[in-house]
């Protein structure tokens, strides 16, 4: 029996498929480590949590960072679409490229049914890309997973906090975020 191998795609090939209309917004996919993966559909609770978090961060970080919602970021072998990406302000509004690791200040995924993907697949990708601060909001248990100290082997620090916790994002040492502001009451 002959073993088959998956064909991995580069970010450039992925972009060409989008430009050629092979992949469209109706496909609801993202590129993870060279694999084109179907994205999880959003439940009302995950969508509401994403929207609430966006609104809170927009107010909190006004003129300090841009908040991007479910838009691509470009990593070496991946182009995921995190629920929330807090990125450096770009004078061109990222019209000529998606944010890259050096422009990413914080990534947040909102997990309802995607917790395993967010922890086991995305976290290692983000760590290898040297994303310094990555959070997963678990809307089922009202917990936040905080990943820090990235390395080629993954994040060296993982902390799980309840919704009553308060944390300071690494990129904004003067700001405290109470997680209760991010979750739906």
Image: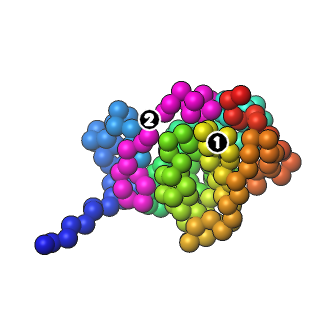
Q: Nearer the viewer, residue 139 or 148?
A: 139
Which residue appears farthest toward the right when viewing the image? 174
Measuring 54% from the left and 48% from the top, which residue is drawn there? 115
Q: Nearer the viewer, mark 1 or mark 2?
A: 1
Secondary structure found at label 1: loop
Image x and y of residue 160, in percent: 70, 53
Measuring 50% from the left and 42% from the top, which residue is drawn there? 113
Check the image and report above or below for 59 versus 121: above
Q: Nearer the viewer, residue 155 or 16?
A: 155
* Residue range highlighted in magenta: 31-51
Image x and y of residue 72, in percent: 50, 44
Q: Is residue 65 shown left or right of residue 140?
A: right
Image quarter in which the C terminus is found: top right
Check the image and report above or below for 79 versus 140: below
Secondary structure found at label 2: loop
Instruction: Give the residue number, with chain letter if any, for mark 1.
Output: 141
Image x and y of residue 38, in percent: 37, 44
Image quarter in which the N terminus is found: bottom left
Q: Dots 1 and 2: beta carbons under 8 Å?
A: no
Instruction: Give the residue number, with chain letter if any, for mark 2.
Output: 41
The disc placed on residue 11 is none
Measuring 38% from the left and 34% from the top, which residue is drawn there? 25
Q: Nearer the viewer, residue 172 or 176?
A: 176
Real-space Cα distance between discs 1 and 2?
19 Å
Image x and y of residue 91, in percent: 64, 41
- The picture quadrant where one finds residue 111 is top right
- Residue 136: tell me if it is visible: yes
Mark nearer the N terminus (1 vs 2) = 2
Measuring 34% from the left and 43% from the top, which residue is drawn there? 18
């Amino acid at each position: 029996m002959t073993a088959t191998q998956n064909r991995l795609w580069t970010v450039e090939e992925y972009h060409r498929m989008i430009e050629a209309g092979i992949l469209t917004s109706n496909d609801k996919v993202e590129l993870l480590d060279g694999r084109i993966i179907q994205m999880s559909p959003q439940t009302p609770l995950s969508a509401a949590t994403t929207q609430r978090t966006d609104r809170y961060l927009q107010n909190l970080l006004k003129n300090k960072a841009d908040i991007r919602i479910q838009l691509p970021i470009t990593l070496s072998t991946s182009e995921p679409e995190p629920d929330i990406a807090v990125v450096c302000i770009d004078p061109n509004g990222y019209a000529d490229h998606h944010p890259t690791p050096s422009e990413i200040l914080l990534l947040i995924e909102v997990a309802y049914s995607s917790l395993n993907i967010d922890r086991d697949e995305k976290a290692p990708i983000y760590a290898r890309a040297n994303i310094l601060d990555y959070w997963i909001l678990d809307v089922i248990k009202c917990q936040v997973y905080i990943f820090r100290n990235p390395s080629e082997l993954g994040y060296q620090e993982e902390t799980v906090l309840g919704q009553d916790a308060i944390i300071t994002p690494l990129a904004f040492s003067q700001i405290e975020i109470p997680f209760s502001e991010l979750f739906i009451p």
